[in-house]
Image (cartoon, helix red, strand yellow):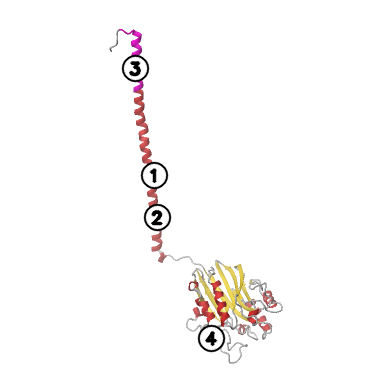
């Protein structure tokens, strides 16, 4: 190597050592850079790869899930005809009677005695009563019931603020419901007084007629029973009351809705038409019409008032259909009428007189979800 001969020997060595150190440092830095490239370069690359693979995995998982969902739906739709769905159903025996228990009416005590016999001995799920006006009559019936049957309280389906029932029937509704309590849970009950009840100078104007409602849970079904006793004669009030009645019935959310009604008008009159046409979405049906589609409205065959066999029918009176049992389902469940009939209990036991001047309505009904 060349060097300045004029420099001292130690200066040359110092410069030479300094150059060597700089070369070594540069060499080390160069190796470190190479090592950084060798080590961190693949890591950065791998990070990008992993990030991209994660996105791809998410996309593939989403596609897989969507495919599984659509495949399941497709299979279920195509096998629908081959799978029998699990269903639930109940069948109920129901009676409804306007029992005409007005104080002073013919043979009232004898008829109530017969009614107690029927309620005690007959097998049924629900027995709807209209016209049970006095508290002491209600008490006599309730105390005669067996342990597996219950009855609404006297003022439970009435306006307790105005109902007397001890001395007169003023302000009372006359509504009661008897039901089998074995396997049945009472959910609620209520009463709504009719807004228009008639002139206070008439009998109906002094009463507390309205809409009684009892909600039961029977097995897996919510069953709501409505009952009413409409104005006895004036079409104007029958019209208003049946419209008000249906404003409540049509809003029921129950699996099975039953309406036992003494509407005091025939199928050709406004009161009945209001019930059947109030709300098309309610899909309420006349149980007699479902069972006897061809002649349900023939009063000679299916009358409930002024029937010849009834001991309280005056001679020459024309039979009428004025009492009805309606059914519906808020959930559009299948409602079938297995049987519809007018039982004559006085022949079965036998009794000396008819239970009422009205006939009992009997039906076996099945609801299937």
Measured from the top left, where is residue 68 in percent x and y?
Answer: 40, 55
Asked if residue 258 lies left or right of residue 121, the reply is: left
Categorize mark 3 by other alpha carbons within 10 Å: few (<14), some (14-19), many (20+). few
* Above or below: residue 286 compared with residue 68: below
- In the picture of the structure, the residue carrying the numbered disc 3 is 20
Element type at mark 1: helix
Instruction: Name the element at disc 2.
Output: helix
Q: Is residue 32 above or below residue 15?
A: below
Q: Magenta stretch?
A: 6-26
Residue 142 in sight: yes
Cα–Cα gap, marks 1 and 4: 79 Å
Residue 149 appears in which quarter of the rendering? bottom right
Residue 345 screen position, x and y as percent: 61, 82
Q: Would you say the residues marked 1 and 4 are in contact, meaning their CB atoms lie under 8 Å apart? A: no
First of labels 3, 1 by sequence position: 3
* Marks 3 and 2 close (CB-CB < 8 Å): no
Residue 299, numbered label: 4
Magenta highlight: main SS:
helix
Crowd rating for badge 4 (residues with CA inside 10 Å; few <14, some 14–19, many 20+) = some
């Amino acid at each position: 190597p060349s060097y300045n001969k004029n420099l001292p020997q130690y200066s040359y060595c110092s410069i030479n050592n300094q150059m060597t150190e700089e070369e070594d440092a540069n060499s080390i830095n160069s190796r470190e850079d190479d090592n950084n490239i060798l080590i961190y370069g693949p890591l950065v690359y791998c990070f990008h790869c992993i990030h991209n693979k994660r996105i791809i995995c998410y996309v593939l998982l989403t596609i897989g899930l969507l495919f599984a969902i659509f495949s399941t739906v497709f299979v279920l739709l195509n096998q629908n005809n081959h799978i029998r769905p699990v269903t639930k159903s109940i069948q109920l025996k129901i009676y409804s009677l306007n029992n005409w228990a007005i104080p002073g009416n013919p043979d009232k005590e004898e008829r109530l005695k017969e009614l107690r016999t029927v309620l005690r001995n007959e097998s049924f799920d629900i027995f709807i009563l209209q016209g049970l006006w006095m508290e002491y009559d209600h008490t006599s019936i309730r105390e005669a019931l067996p342990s597996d049957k219950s009855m609404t309280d006297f003022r439970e389906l009435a306006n307790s603020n105005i109902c007397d029932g001890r001395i007169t029937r003023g302000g009372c509704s006359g509504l009661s419901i008897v039901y089998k309590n074995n396997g049945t849970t009472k959910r609620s009950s209520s009463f709504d007084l009719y807004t228009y009840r008639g002139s206070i100078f008439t009998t109906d104007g002094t009463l507390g007629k309205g809409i009684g409602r009892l909600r039961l849970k029977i097995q897996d079904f919510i069953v709501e029973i409505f009952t009413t006793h409409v104005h006895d004669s004036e079409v104007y009030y029958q019209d208003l009351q049946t419209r008000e009645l249906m404003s409540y019935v049509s809003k029921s959310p129950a699996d099975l809705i039953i309406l036992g009604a003494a509407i005091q008008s025939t199928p050709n009159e406004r009161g009945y038409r209001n019930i059947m046409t109030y709300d098309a979405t309610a899909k309420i049906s006349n149980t007699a019409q479902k069972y006897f589609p061809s002649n349900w409205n023939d009063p000679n065959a299916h009358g409930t008032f002024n029937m010849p066999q009834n001991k309280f029918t005056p001679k020459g009176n024309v039979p009428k259909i004025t009492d009805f049992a309606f059914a519906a389902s808020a959930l559009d469940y299948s409602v079938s009428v297995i049987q519809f009939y007018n039982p004559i209990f006085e022949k079965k036991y036998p009794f000396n007189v008819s239970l009422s001047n009205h006939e009992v309505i009997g039906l076996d009904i099945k609801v299937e979800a």
